[in-house]
Image (spheres, helix red, strand yellow):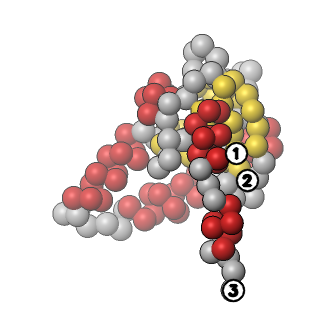
């Protein structure tokens, strides 16, 4: 399970280090793609295949919404590959799409990790009404 919050920086070449705890969970060939909330989502290869590819491969090719979803997600998806120093180069398109600047936060989100611009993450979290969110779990 992915959990925790890690603060770090993207270098001038668009590279960062995935936190070691997350890297260990990601296994071989992890995938990153654009998130729905201006962040990058990172999945294990198996979970990407199950949650993203698996759902979309079942859609009817005549479904125009499904076509748009495929274009949005797969045009902005990349396989994570570390260099010899353990850094991951992030596609500049993902950096721009998610508004990532130098300071970023990588968080655990149960079944995946997310990379956020630090200021955008703080703003997003400040807007959450925690009592309202948690009330969904009341029985």
Q: What's the CA distance linking mark 1 and mark 2?
A: 8 Å
Which residue is denoted by mark 2 in the rendering? 2
Query: Closer to us: mark 1 or mark 2?
Result: 1
Tell me if label 1 and label 2 are in contact, CB under 8 Å: yes
Q: Earlier in the sequence, mark 2 or mark 3?
A: 2
Image position, residue 41 (x, y; %):
56, 46
Q: Residues within 10 Å of mark 3 (few under 14, many from 20)?
A: few
Which residue is outermost to the right?
21
Asked if 52 appears above or below 59 in the picture, the reply is above
Residue shown at 55%/29% (left/top)? Answer: 100
Tag 2–tag 3 contact (CB < 8 Å):
no
Residue tagged 3: 139
User: Seen from this angle, which residue lies furthest top?
Assistant: 12
Q: Which one is nearer the viewer's eye here, 139 or 57?
A: 139
- The residue located at (58%, 15%) in the rendering is 13
Location of residue 87 in the rendering, given as x and y in whole percent from the top left corner = 68, 25
Choose the circle earlier in sequence order: 1 or 2.
2
What is the C-alpha distance between the residues marked 2 and 3? 26 Å
Task: State which quarter of the image contains the C terminus.
Answer: bottom right
C-beta proximity under 8 Å, tags 3 and 1:
no
Residue 36 seen in render? yes
For label 1, the crowd category at 10 Å Cα-Cα, with few meaning under 14, some 14 to 19 and many 20 or more, is many
Please tell me which residue lies in front, 31 or 11: 11
Q: Position of residue 16 (x, y in %)?
A: 67, 26
Q: Nearer the viewer, residue 81 or 134?
A: 134
Give above or below for 134 relative to 80: below
Which residue bears the numbered disc 1? 107
- Residue drawn where x is 75% and y is 58% of the image: 1
Residue farthest bottom in this picture = 139
Q: Which SS class for mark 1?
A: strand
Q: Position of residue 57 (x, y in %)?
A: 37, 62
């Amino acid at each position: 399970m992915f959990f925790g919050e890690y603060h770090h920086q993207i270098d001038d070449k668009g590279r960062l280090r995935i936190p070691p705890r997350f890297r260990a969970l990601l296994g071989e060939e992890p995938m990153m793609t654009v998130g729905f909330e201006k962040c990058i989502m990172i999945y294990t290869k198996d979970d990407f295949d199950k949650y993203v590819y698996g759902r979309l491969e079942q859609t009817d090719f005549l479904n125009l919404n499904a076509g748009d979803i495929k274009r949005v997600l797969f045009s902005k998806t990349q396989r994570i590959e570390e260099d010899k120093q353990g850094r991951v180069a992030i596609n500049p398109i993902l950096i721009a799409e998610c508004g990532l600047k130098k300071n970023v936060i990588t968080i655990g989100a149960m079944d995946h990790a997310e990379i956020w611009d630090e200021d955008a993450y703080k703003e997003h979290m400040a807007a959450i009404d925690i009592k309202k969110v948690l009330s969904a779990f009341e029985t």
